[in-house]
Amino acid sequence: MSEKKPESPLKSWAKFSTVAIQMGVTIYLGNLLGSWLDGKFETTFLEPAVTLLAVFLSMYVIIKAVKDLNS
């Protein structure tokens, strides 16, 4: 059996920094999309709804990344 080589702390840090950047970009783009949809359909509820959906999507990606890192 081959043993799994432990990752360096720098590699783990790099993974999480990219996840954080991805989270910020996802939320920002969700906010822009919601704002655009509000303007297009003349509503006021789509911006917060789409932004909240983007937050939940980002949290899902982070939880999945943490689980993959620990397994």
Image: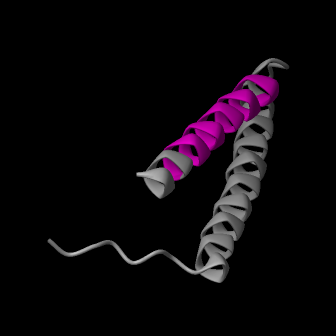
In front here: 34 or 19? Answer: 19
Image point (80%, 18%), residue name? 45
Q: Is residue 54 left or right of residue 71?
A: right
Q: Give the vertical position of 49 relative to 19 (above or below).
A: above
Q: Position of residue 6 (x, y in %)?
A: 47, 74
Q: Position of residue 42 (x, y in %)?
A: 80, 23
Residue found farthest to the right: 44
Q: Based on the picture, tell me whether residue 52 belongs to the magenta stretch.
A: yes
Model colouring: one colour
Q: Give the vertical position of 52 relative to 69 (above or below).
A: above
Image point (78%, 42%), residue name? 31
Q: Position of residue 55 (x, y in %)?
A: 71, 36
The residues colored magenta run 47-65
Q: Give the vertical position of 50 relative to 19 (above or below).
A: above
Image point (71%, 69%), residue name? 17
Residue found farthest to the left: 1
Q: Position of residue 3 (x, y in %)?
A: 28, 73
Question: Residue 50 falls in which quadrant of the image?
Answer: top right
Our reading of the magenta stretch's main secondary structure is helix
In front here: 24 or 39? Answer: 24
Image point (49%, 52%), residue name? 70
Locate the N terminus by quadrant. Answer: bottom left
Q: Based on the picture, tell me whether residue 33 belongs to the magenta stretch.
A: no
In front here: 68 or 42? Answer: 68
In front here: 29 or 7? Answer: 7
